[in-house]
Amino acid sequence: MPSSVMPTSSQGDGQASPAAISAVGLRKSYGDTTVLDGIDLRIPAGSVFALLGPNGAGKTTAVKILSTLIAADGGQAQVAGHDVATSPDGVRAAIGVTGQFSAVDGLITGEENMLLMADLHHLSKSDGRRVTAELLERFDLVEAAKKPVSTYSGGMKRRLDIAMTLVGNPRIIFLDEPTTGLDPRSRHNMWGIIRELVSDGVTVFLTTQYLEEADELADRIAVLTDGKIAAEGSADELKRMIPGGHLRLRFSDPAAYQSAATALREVTRDDEALSLQIPSDGSQRELRSILDWLDAAGIEADELTVHTPDLDDVFFALTSTTMVPSQPKEDAR
Ligand SMILES: Nc1ncnc2c1ncn2[C@@H]1O[C@H](COP(=O)(O)OP(=O)(O)OP(=O)(O)O)[C@@H](O)[C@H]1O
Ligand SMILES: [Mg+2]
């Protein structure tokens, strides 16, 4: 298989690992709607990159441009060392794409879909059978293999989709929302499979609605909103961009709630839920001082929870139309 088309995979020192995917100033509009308004990317070989963004942000559009399914209006992109505009065949030979919506044929069986894919990749009959059997096993589809795909559940179709993507042993894989619709166990299995691919040196470009997924898998995460990359970094770097840590005190007694609300400075009130939110870094020292203070004031909360910022907070802060990244969040929920 043409798995050698891409630049050599990362050489260990990690310093100058070659980009598997890079883009400069990518633009795409549909009519008056600007979907991508100048996107820059650099994704090192052998890493996982997650593109996050609200519905309609342009994630699938970016995947389609980089996998040569549609053309950009402007800018440049290289995948596996090939320009997507001038050398789309080179790009296609190096990549596998699992689209957001299933591309499997429902009328034939899972196994037949796989064998068809092997034919498309010009595998010999015996190689095709071997690869098909291995992948069906790996994706827990052996039992279902002889049944028409129209009888599969959504999760089974999704697994078959990704198994089909791997038939050609691609070195760069685009996964557009690979785990949407999967149950938690299947999602964890899928994460395991993605990690295995990465440990074999495969580069993964993934879009997801699940911030937890990006947190689990991705080396770098970019948040796409309003046509631009609003932030990019590791999960930790992104979390540090927003001050989101707080304590939450919940009361059942309205009088206790009122006295705490008036006495505590810097609180955000939720009068309906009788809960107060106090900015905090979640450190032991700060927790102790707040608890001491509550004790001293004779105030007893029914519930105390500590909230440290997660990628959800980053997502909401960055994709909210009323906030910019450098502003503190007013309400972290
Ligand atoms: N072929 C098309 N013709 C016109 N508009 C399109 C076309 N494809 C996408 N769009 C528009 O481009 C925007 C981005 O769509 P895209 O599918 O890339 O978003 P997305 O980030 O993948 O969203 P989702 O999370 O819902 O999958 C949307 O406003 C969509 O309506
Ligand atoms: Mg999409």
Image (spheres, rainbow, N blue to C red):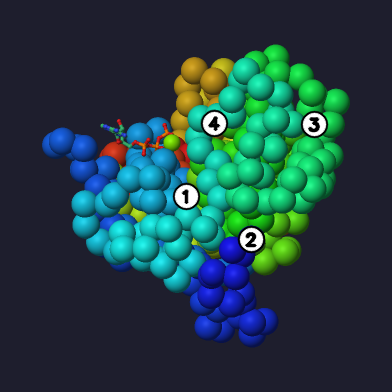
Ligand 2 placement by image quarter: top left
Of the two numbered discs 3 and 2 on the same chain, state the one appearing first in sequence. Answer: 2
Pointer 4 local density, CA inside 10 Å: few below 14, some 14–19, many at least 20: some
Residue at image position (55%, 29%) is 102
Sequence-wise first label, 3 or 4: 4
Q: Position of residue 315 (x, y in %)?
A: 46, 44
Given contact means CB atoms under 8 Å apart, are the residues at marks 3 and 4 in contact? Answer: no
What's the distance in space between the residues labelled 3 and 2, CA to CA? 24 Å
Q: Hey, what amino acid is under mark 2? A: Met
Comparing 283 with 48, the one in front is 48
- Residue closest to the eye, 190 or 113: 113
Label 1 or label 2, whichever lies nearer to me, is 2
Q: Residues within 10 Å of mark 3 (few under 14, many from 20)?
A: some
Task: Name the amino acid, label 1.
Answer: Leu
| Residue shown at the point (60%, 50%) measured from the top left | 121
Which tag, 1 or 3, sits closer to the chain's start?
1
Label 1 vs 2, first from the N-terminus: 2
Q: CA distance from mark 4 to mark 2?
A: 22 Å
Q: Position of residue 201 (x, y in %)?
A: 67, 66
Q: Quadrant of residue 295?
A: top right
The reply to whether discs 3 and 2 touch (Cβ–Cβ < 8 Å) is: no
Amino acid identity at mark 4: Ala
Q: To which residue does mark 1 refer?
A: 51
Q: Identify the residue under disc 3.
A: 141
Q: CA distance from mark 3 to mark 4?
A: 17 Å
Which mark, by number, is residue 1? 2
Residue most toward the left? Answer: 32
Left-right relation of 101 to 141: left
Badge 1 density bin: few <14, some 14–19, many ≥20, Cα 10 Å: many
Circle nearer the viewer, 1 or 3: 3
Residue sticking out furthest to the top: 151
Question: Distance from label 1 to label 4 (Cα)?
Answer: 21 Å
